């Protein structure tokens, strides 16, 4: 799975820590999700999408192999 979280975050002028604070997770969680080392829970994915006022589908993309 790929994601566009870093692009949305940077466009909003937010650091990883600021996004983490906004959705009540750790900075490490944001980092590992952005680099696709961790697949977030539905709750975290929904919180990120809600924060950016976008759909989950705009943030996350399934790979052809997924």
Image (cartoon, helix red, strand yellow):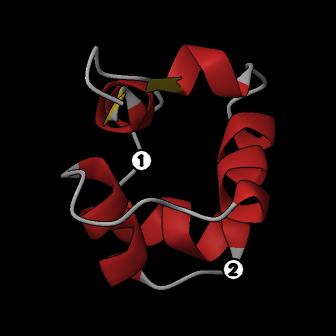
- Of residues 50 and 15, which is closer to you in this image? 50
Expressed as whole percent of the image width and height from the top left, the position of residue 55 reads 74, 20
Residue in view at x 32 percent, y 25 percent: 7
- Residue at disc 1, secondary structure: loop
> What residue is disc 2 on?
24
Residue that appears at 31% across and 81% down: 28
- Residue occupying the point 52% across, 70% down: 20
- Tell me the quarter of the picture where residue 10 sits: top left
Q: Residue furthest front?
A: 65
Q: Is residue 24 above or below residue 54?
A: below
Check disc 2 and report its element: helix, strand or loop: loop
Q: Is residue 18 left or right of residue 4?
A: right
Give how far apart the Cα atoms at labels 1 and 2 are: 15 Å
Image coordinates of residue 1 in percent, x first then y, are: 34, 35
Q: In front here: 41 or 44?
A: 41
- The C terminus appears in which quarter of the rendering? top left
Instruction: Using the rendered view, name the quadrant where residue 49 is placed.
Output: top right
Q: Residues within 10 Å of mark 2 (few under 14, many from 20)?
A: few
Residue 14 is labelled as 1
Name the N-terminal-most of marks 1 and 2.
1
Question: Foreground mark, 1 or 2?
Answer: 2
Q: Is residue 40 left or right of residue 63?
A: right
How many C-alpha atoms fall within 10 Å of the one at disc 1: few (<14), some, or many (≥20)?
Answer: few
Is 66 located above or below residue 23 in the figure? above
């Amino acid at each position: 799975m790929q994601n566009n979280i870093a692009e949305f975050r940077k466009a909003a002028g937010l650091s990883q820590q600021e996004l983490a604070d906004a959705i009540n997770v750790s900075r490490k969680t944001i980092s590992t999700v952005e680099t696709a080392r961790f697949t977030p829970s539905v709750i975290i994915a929904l919180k990120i999408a809600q924060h950016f006022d976008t759909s989950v589908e705009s943030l996350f993309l399934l790979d052809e192999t997924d």
